Amino acid sequence: MKNRSSFETLIGALVIAAAVFFVVLVVRGTGIATPEGYRVSASFGNADGLKPGTEVRISGVKVGSVIEQTLDGESLQAKVVMEIDRTLKLPTDSSVRVLSDGLLGGSYLMIDPGGEEEFLADGGHIDFTSDAVNLIDLISTAVFSQKDD
């Protein structure tokens, strides 16, 4: 009886260790774990498809992730807070766009660095933004706005 109990305890410990390993793997893979960085925010009229963990890219390379998304009660715009790699300095005139990874892919944020010599500090705000484009609305507009000859 004692050997069976020890064996069951060992198997239980292995199952718990495997579960912890997979949780850590998932959190790191989705970008939810906050990297070492500084926070900047941006406001969008349409931030469809963004959520915590969404990638922030510059020139197609991941440089951060979205950590928070709220609705501004006064402007009724989506305020998105991003955490950017601390080794990068973003000029104050940088812009950010909500882009899609394709027809079926998710959304991500693309930062286009500006040319100013001053840089955004922790807690800074990116003023120049482009909203998400709803592909279904865009296709509907193109199809139904054609005039018959």
Image (cartoon, rainbow, N blue to C red):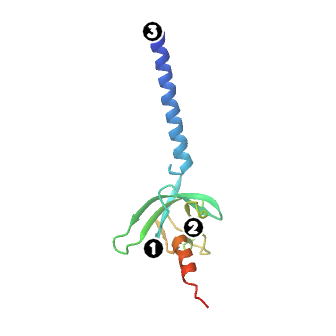
- What is the crowding at mark 3: few (fewer than 14 residues within 10 Å), some, or many (at least 20)? few
Which residue bears the numbered disc 1?
Answer: 45
The correct choice, above or below, for 91 with respect to 122 in the image is below
User: Where, quadrant-wise, is the N terminus in this rendering?
Assistant: top left
- What is the crowding at mark 1: few (fewer than 14 residues within 10 Å), some, or many (at least 20)? some
Inter-mark Cα distance, 3 to 1? 65 Å
Which residue bears the numbered disc 3?
Answer: 2
Amino acid bearing label 2: Leu
Q: In the image as oriented, which residue stretches furthest toward the left?
A: 73
Disc 3 to disc 2: CB gap under 8 Å:
no
Disc 3 to disc 1: CB gap under 8 Å:
no
Disc 2 to disc 1: CB gap under 8 Å:
no
Q: Residue 85: tell me if it is visible.
A: no
Work out whether mark 3 precedes mark 2 in sequence or the reverse, and give the earlier one: 3
User: Where, quadrant-wise, is the C terminus in this rendering?
Assistant: bottom right
Amino acid bearing label 1: Gly
Inter-mark Cα distance, 3 to 2? 60 Å
Q: Residue 74: tell me if it is visible.
A: yes
| Residue 91: image location, x then y, percent | 57, 70
SS under mark 3: helix
| Residue in front for this viewpoint, 111 or 46 | 46
Residue at (37, 75) in percent of width and height = 75
| Residue 69: image location, x then y, percent | 43, 62
SS under mark 2: strand
Residue 146 found in image quarter: bottom right
| Residue 118: image location, x then y, percent | 56, 72
Which residue bears the numbered disc 2?
Answer: 99
The correct choice, above or below, for 43 with respect to 142 in the image is above
SS under mark 1: loop
| Residue 2: image location, x then y, percent | 45, 9
Work out whether mark 3 precedes mark 1 in sequence or the reverse, and give the earlier one: 3
